[in-house]
Image (cartoon, helix red, strand yellow):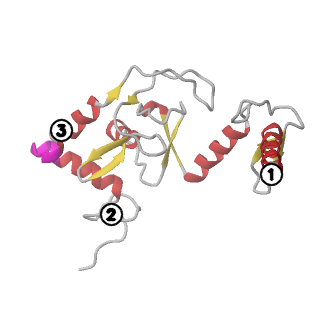
Amino acid sequence: MTTPSTCSKCESKVKAKGLCSSHYMTQYMTERVQSGRTPRSYGGDPTNRFWQKVNKQGPSHDNYITGEPLAPCWDWDSGLNRLGYGLFKLHPKNVSAHRFSFELLRTEDISELELDHLCKNRKCVNPEHLDPVTHQEHMRRQAEEVFNRPLCINGHDWQSEGTYFFTPSGGRKCWVCRRITLDKYNRKSKS
């Protein structure tokens, strides 16, 4: 008997038991809760463990696309990955806390999609702040948001003409920062 290459619930690549990663984790968690069994080393219902690590009184932000105010963020108060996103131990693996929250509280199938934080708070797990989008749309939104910033990373204005230049890869660089970097380099090379 051959194993299927696509998930029985969607068209994603199979991870285990004929299901994609997203559907497998959902089924695993559901079976554990319904049977009353829990992973020994992590004790307790995964859903209860998850909510113990969430602070629903987080900061308030505006939707970075529409500018409308959003409800307060639900900050993840436990482990973070190297990029600042929450990690949740769902035996036997770590899963993204914001993705777990979205799958727990919303019904859309997001196995092929990425979640864009509308609040720009990477620790936020509020599903109302998460917008499921394709990778291409997510990258377009990030590039647009970075390009529309009024200041460079060091706080120099780059809204007016002549304060920035474009790199061969299409990125935008600040002239003031470039001059500072060149001055430091020239001072070092002279000494």
Name the residue that disc number 2 marks.
15
Q: Amino acid at mark 1?
A: Ser
Residue 7, percent across and down? 34, 63
Identify the mark nearer the N-term, 2 or 1: 2
Identify the mark nearer the N-term, 1 or 3: 3
Q: Amino acid at mark 2?
A: Lys
Q: Give the spatial CA distance, label 2 vs label 1.
A: 55 Å
**Which residue in the rendered view is the most extreme toward the bottom?**
1
Boundaries of the magenta span: 32-41
Name the residue that disc number 1 marks.
189
Nearer-the-camera pick, 90 or 154:
154
Residue 149, percent across and down? 71, 33
Contact flag, marks 1 and 3 (Cβ < 8 Å)? no
Is 33 covered by the magenta stretch? yes
Name the residue that disc number 3 marks.
45
Is 132 covered by the magenta stretch? no
Q: Tell whether 41 sits left or right of 25.
A: left
Contact flag, marks 2 and 1 (Cβ < 8 Å)? no
**Which residue in the rendered view is the most extreme toward the left?**
36
Q: Secondary structure at mark 2?
A: loop
Q: Tell whether 20 sits left or right of 170.
A: left
Q: Tell whether 190 sits left or right of 150.
A: right
Q: Give the spatial CA distance, label 3 vs label 2.
A: 23 Å
The residue shown at (80%, 39%) is 180
Residue 112, percent across and down? 46, 55
Residue 186 in the image: above or below residue 177: below
